[in-house]
Structure formats: C-alpha cells, structure tokens
Amino acid sequence: MKKEQANTTQTKQLGRPSNPNSARQKKIQERLEKREAGLLKRGRPVKEGSKRQETLKKRAEKVNSGVELKRGRPIVEGSKRQIELAKKAEKVVSE
C-alpha cells in the first residue's frame, strides 16, 4: 500500500516589498487620509461669478420654479425644412 501525502501549497508574496518610508508611499498614505476626511479635491476649482456659474444658477432657478427645460435648438414651424419633413411624414402615413 501507498502512503497518502497531503497536498500542501506554499504561496509567496508577489512583487517586491514596499518601503513604508519612501516618498511615494507617504504620498499615497496622505491621499488616503485626505480622502477619508473628505478633504481630497479633484478637478478644477469652481470660479464663483463666472459666466458658466451664472448660467448654471439660472438653469437651477428655472428647474426649481417648475419651468420645463428643453434640449437643443427650438424648431421654427414655418421653415423650409419643417415643411419638407411634414410632406415626407404624410407620404409615409398614406402608404
């Protein structure tokens, strides 16, 4: 009879060990601490009083007052293009 051997596997830590005192590791740690504290700012800072901020404020006021905002350019009903589209729609419906 054969003796049964237990299969054992050894796992090694992959990669080289990190130095906790390196500048990179300190930077990563500082970022983690700032993120947990909610102090990590990302992107460009908002410039109060800029034209974009005024536009966004007006848009927010319209939404809060219940005005329906539409996307894109408004349609001019009597334009040449709208007349052609109406004719095409009638042609498709009639078929």
Image (cartoon, rainbow, N blue to C red):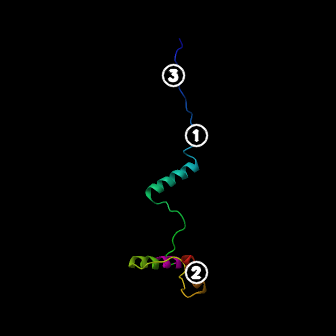
Earlier-in-chain disc, 3 versus 2? 3
Single out the mark in the foreground, 1 or 2. 2
Image height of 27 relative to 55, above or below = above
Q: Earlier in the sequence, mark 3 or mark 1?
A: 3
- Magenta part of the chain: 50-56
- Return the mark for residue 85: 2
Task: Please say if 25 is above or below 65.
Answer: above
For the residue marked with disc 1, what is the amino acid? Pro
Q: Nearer the viewer, residue 70 or 92?
A: 92
Q: Which residue is mark 3?
A: 6
What amino acid is found at the position of numbered circle 2 in the picture? Answer: Leu
Q: Residues within 10 Å of mark 2 (few under 14, many from 20)?
A: few
| Callout 3 amino acid | Ala
Q: Please, what secondary structure does the residue beneath circle 1 have?
A: loop
Instruction: Tell me the residue that label 1 is attached to.
Output: 17
Question: Is residue 32 found inside the magenta-colored segment of the image?
Answer: no
